[in-house]
Amino acid sequence: MTRAEKARRILAILDALYPDPPIPLDHEDPFTLLVAVLLSAQTTDERVNRVTPGLFARAKTPEAMSRLGVDEILAEIRSCGLAPAKARNIKALSEILVRDHAGRVPADLDALEALPGVGHKTASVVMIQAFGIPAFPVDTHIHRLAARWGLSDGRSVEKTERDLKAVFPPETWARVHLKMIYFGREHCPARGHDLASCPICGWAASKRRMQEEARAGGGGPASRKALAKEPAAAGRPKAAARKTAAKGRKKSAARKKRTGPAARGTPRRRS
């Protein structure tokens, strides 16, 4: 099965499981989405959604946010991870939006990435969710799923983004991005996952991938069954390897004994 064929089958499963998935971060417009996505780094969406109502009650436009002090912003978002740095970035990007963009969030990927604290993934989310411009945000969860499903070699997030864009049509990127996030949370966790019984991993993941994750401690009965079918030479325990090496040394010593001086006869002494 080619990657493109696999992607079509995966999309059909995701569409059936999640017909109309909501954007998990609460927001009202591009600016509130930008702030919410920035806050979501190393923080759950649930926590962000508990924090943003208080913050946006005080300021939900770049102009209003730029007038708040960093300490005032920090007081509202303190429970988020990396809160001090995020407070500084929210203040700084709000000032830049007012000064350089007429108080509006630019619908341009490069301009978004130039804002303090806004990386490629955050900018891509804003582009696709706020402006409907095709982009494929890839976080660590989507990166993991793409590797498990054999849609990418998983060497880097950037490579995964290129690979996913190559197998999914641009008009599907927004919904595939969201549906992969929901699927990862509900069916495909990072640790202790039984790939063999997963609705997608069960047929999309390679046997090698199943065996690797089973050896790493993940998986249930089905994954352990896949591991049991692994050739004995692969992943052989160190104790077995030492035993084999010892047998080899014994055989070598036996051969030397058979072909040594005693076996050839005692050489004549020279006069």
Image: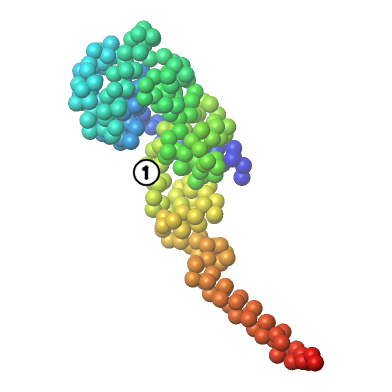
Residue 55 visible within the image: no
Residue 248 location, quadrant? bottom right
Residue carrying label 1:
186
Kind of element beneath mark 1: helix
Residue at point 70%, 85% (across, down): 260
x then y, percent, for residue 13:
48, 40
Is 169 or 231 nearer to us in this picture?
A: 231
> Is residue 46 placed above or below 206 in the rendered structure?
above
x then y, percent, for residue 198:
44, 50
> Is residue 218 placed above or below 115 in the rendered structure?
below
x then y, percent, for residue 148:
49, 46
| Kind of residue at badge 1 | Glu
Quarter of the image with the N terminus is top right
Residue at point 51%, 25% (across, down): 171
Is 206 or 255 nearer to us in this picture?
A: 255
Query: Crowding at label 1, few (<14), some or many (≥20) Cα neighbours within 10 Å?
Result: few
